[in-house]
Image (tube, rainbow, N blue to C red):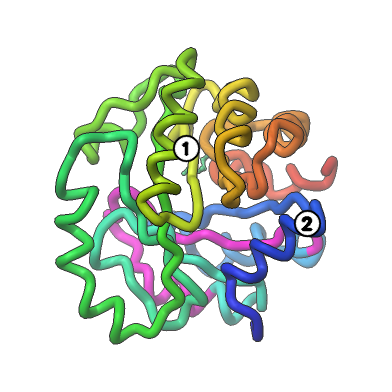
Amino acid sequence: MSQSIANFLKSAKQNNKSLLAVLIDPDKAKPSHIQNLLSPKNREKIDLILVGGSVLTSGDIESTVREIKKQSDLPCIIFPGSPDQISRDADAILLLALVSGRNPELLIGKHVESALRLRQSQLEILSTAYILIDGGKQTTVSYISGTTPIPADKPGLAAMTALAGEQLGKQLIYMDAGSGAKNPIPTQMISAVREHTTHPIIVGGGIRSVEGIHAAWNAGADVVVIGNRLEEDPNFLSGL
Ligand code: 1GP
């Protein structure tokens, strides 16, 4: 794609266009599976592809990105669970600072480890304030990160955290209930964050219905991320 992902997000925002992202987990990403997720009908509805996982057991990021690129020309953004999840074939990477947590490794330590490799990759870097919200059960990301998510009934805390992220210079806000969350992020919380930042807001975790996608968009999300639900039913987006 010729324009940068940052500009793509900015112009979608200016044109009030809500975006849909699909999360592809390299552990589950056989070529046939990617083909199902990125069927021509789904590609009409999908604006962005995120790829990555909190922990990879069998999959690898390089071959997954290559396969995604073989099958579609949608923008492909790495959503890394660790510093080794870098592929120069992707279009960009979310450089996540886990600002809802107080784990220094995920605020600066891992970033130092990956700084040189990232520069060499020449990937577009999207500096992101990553905010975990309690989704009703412990998710892999909260367990692995050793951090406590923000309680779902504290919208003010989420808003202050997002604002602090913006003041620290982050370009994007990612509010995540974690993959497979029992409950999606409450719309009141998305709205509270929306009131405090003009930066693009990505929302994901536990969204399992088309109504849930619209609810998050209407509350102020610029990008909604769907992972598990589309894996279970590749036709899920037909109702969107
Ligand atoms: C997790 O937002 C993503 O970061 C996707 O979550 O798999 O629950 O849709 P789900």
Task: Kindly identify the amino acid type of the residue bearing the numbered disc 1.
Answer: Asp
Identify which residue is drawn at 58% across, 46% down.
201
Secondary structure type for disc 1: strand
Residue 21 is tagged as: none
Res. 5 image quadrant: bottom right
Secondary structure type for disc 2: helix
Is 236 contained in the magenta span?
A: no
Look at the picture and state if 5 lies above or below 235.
Answer: below
Residue 176 is tagged as: 1
> Which residue, as the protein is rendered here, is positioned at the far front?
167
> Which residue, as the protein is rendered here, is positioned at the far right?
239
Mark 1 or mark 2: which is in front?
Answer: 1
Identify which residue is drawn at 77% across, 30% down.
211
Does residue 39 appear anywhere in the picture? yes
Instruction: Tell me if 28 is positioned left or right of 31 in this view.
Output: left
Res. 61 image quadrant: bottom left
Does residue 26 appear anywhere in the picture? no
Q: Which residues are magenta?
A: 44-67
Q: Of the residues under marks 1 and 2, which one precedes in the sequence?
A: 2
Instruction: Tell me if 164 is positioned left or right of 36 in this view.
Output: left
The spot of residue 49 in percent (x, y) is 58, 62
Say which of 191 and 123 sits in front: 191
Q: Is mark 1 within 8 Å of ligand 1?
A: yes
Q: Which residue carries the number 2 mark?
A: 45
Task: Kindly identify the amino acid type of the residue bearing the numbered disc 2.
Answer: Lys
